[in-house]
Amino acid sequence: MRDAELAQLAEEHGVATSYADWRGERAPVSVDTLRHVLTALGLDVTDPRAALEEHRSRRADRLLPPAVVIRAGRAPSLALPEGARTWIELGDGSWADSGTPPPLGIHVLHAEHADVRQHVPLLVVPDRLPQRPASPGRRAWGLMAQLYSVRSRASWGMGDLRDLADLADWSARDLGASFTLINPVHATEPLPPVEPSPYLPVGRRYSSPLYLRVEDVPEYALLEPEQREEVQRLARPLRERGRTADLIDRDAVWAAKRAALHILYQVPRPPEREAAYQAFQEREGASLVEYATWCAFAEEHGSDYRGWPEALRDATHPRVGAEAMRNWTRVDFHRWTQWLLDEQLAAAQGAARAAGMPIGIVHDLAVGVQGGGADAWMYAGALASGVSVGAPPDAFNQQGQDWAQPPWHPIRLAERGYGPFVAQMRQAMRHAGGIRVDHVMGLFRLWWVPEGASPAEGTYVRYDHEGMVGALLLAAHECDALVVGEDLGTVEPWVREHLAERGVLGTSVLWFERGEGGRPRRPEEWRTDCLATVATHDLPPVASYLSAEHVELRDRLGLLTRAVEEERADAEAQVAAWRGMLVDLGLLDPDTDPLSDQAAVITALHAYLAMTPARLVGVALTDVVGDRRMQNQPGTKDEYPNWRVPLTGTEGEPVLLDDLMADPRLGETVRRALRPVSEGLGTGR
């Protein structure tokens, strides 16, 4: 009986008691998992019946839900007791009748009945995002790159925002690309060691100064000659390493850039620069101070706030303000670096648009943040503790995944009007033509893994998707940005339908597009409203996929759950099936050997993508240059150099951005690989 009541309590809180696994079979969720997850939601489950009764009693006493979300052009419609009245406090401070559709934005809905008065956030969100590029039926293509891996002779050992501007400019002017899609550039630790994964940031509200080009800071031109030489002494060893195929060393890069930025920070700013800095501070408000305060504290106490002195663990504690004032110079330094990032992010998007890109830079949004990082500290009240976000086992990750990120608390986030989430979205899209939302299904439900449990021992927790998707669309509307949702893996069919109805593009990956019997889909069978790609950053480059190197790698790392011979045979069968499809479509010569002429297969795969109706086509820069190494091997941390692999060519030689733009031989290789999309889709303008 207690287990039945526990299950009912779970269901009423959006916690799944069973789910469909990747094989399509129903998998039950253990009682222990339900207890852990419900506890993380703030429930006392020692007596499930009492908890259920208390929950229902509280629900009955409320006039309003935690938040009300409506689409543009509609008025709030609520089931209220007879005699209740409602009114709206608009975002600008004025008042409006609740029977009139309010404008887009975040407002407050008030309700009164008898002696009960309540108010909750009211979000008015777009019904649907418009198509981008604007003309119906127009398609566009662009390069996809892990920015840190795209180095130049001028960058400091890893790709930066100037490299991004140059990559976008070159790919637009010389190749006709409409966008450049990059990895997340979210905030990283203020002191080494720096987490290499761009998908495990300390925060999504702000960005990482790792990506700054020091010489592009205007104050660099004001340095004395000996100061410039000091900055260049810091840069030289990094530039030398950046011309090799050695792994990227973020710790060394940040140590040098941090020292250089401290030199620049001391330079008096001209009046117009100071005015611009002050304007940035006013726009960002308290959030910027809180983030910079976390950075200053992290420099002193470590980058996991859960290990700080107890008073400092609560961002609202009075001692936090006092300590921030004591460390104000360091706090202001971190505010200043975010201003520089804002300028260079704007410059990159400006360069892309000036080169003719109708979309420009498409930024990537990580699923979440580190449990002890800046956002977790700033938004602690809106996050759940004792659990982390991950994914259940699937065909490519048969042990499941634990991403070590705290999930949003569904109710507490709604009670805050989705404000922390909206702020993160606005930041990601402020200087972008679009955003790719990693694991977009997380706006509907997330896989919660109890602390100490294996990823397979988690369960799904539902969110109010009208609120989550609505908040995303509101930010995208404000920033005039398109949205691509990464909807791969286990996805309920209605989720894709809902996102398509709202103007959110999906993601279709060639290797996963199979029909009956596992056969490759013909290009005309693909959906239209999507970003079509050959692979993702979690999959091997084409060169590795064709040779089944990825199977040997996963075998060496102990990631396979069946015999390596079976995995290899399966991988080879998939390559053979796709080769057959390419030959049937006339895209590949029947005599072509995929192992000896991989460039021909890569070109044919891009030609296949051009034949699909997909609105956007993304081409991995790694495939264009013949890179073989994976950027990330899911299921590993230190066993594989995830997120530290620089861009290299077919023989493992380093490929620098300068060479891509100027080397005739390499340029011809690039053009040959891209010709099907550059000619088949045109410029998208």
Image: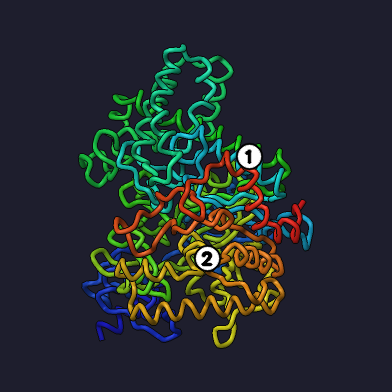
In-front residue for pair 466/516: 516
The quarter holding residue 55 reads bottom left
Please, what is the three-letter code of the amino acid marked with disc 1? Ala
**Residue 156 locus on image (x, y percent):** 45, 34
Task: Give whichever of 25, 579 is nearer the camera.
Answer: 579
Which structural element holds mark 1?
helix
Quarter of the image for residue 133 reads bottom right
Position of 468 with respect to 259 (left or right) is: right
Say if residue 502 shows up in the picture: no
Vertical placement of residue 238 versus 627, above or below? above
Query: Which is more foreground, mark 1 or mark 2?
Result: 1
Question: Total of numbered circles in the picture?
Answer: 2
Residue 427 seen by the camera: yes
Residue 662, numbered label: 1
Q: Residue at x 64, y 47 (%)?
A: 667
On the image, which quarter does residue 641 sit in? bottom left
Residue 92: x %, y % from top left: 61, 41
Residue drawn where x is 45% and y is 80% of the image: 570
Q: Secondary structure at mark 2?
A: helix
CA neighbours of label 1 inside 10 A, class few (<14), some (14 to 19), many (20+): few
Please determine whether, in this image, residue 245 is positioned above or below residue 64.
Answer: above
Task: Give the residue type at disc 2.
Answer: His
In the rendered image, the quadrant that contains the N terminus is: bottom left
Q: Residue 568, percent across and down?
A: 42, 77
Give the percent coordinates (x, y) of residue 164: 57, 41
Tell me what residue is drawn at x 43 percent, y 23 percent: 232
Using the numbered discs, state the Cα–Cα distance from disc 1 to disc 2 in whole angstroms: 47 Å
The circle on residue 465 is 2
The numbered mark, 1 or 2, whose residue comes first in the sequence reads 2
Q: Is residue 123 left or right of residue 192?
A: right
The correct choice, above or below, for 670 with respect to 254 in the image is below
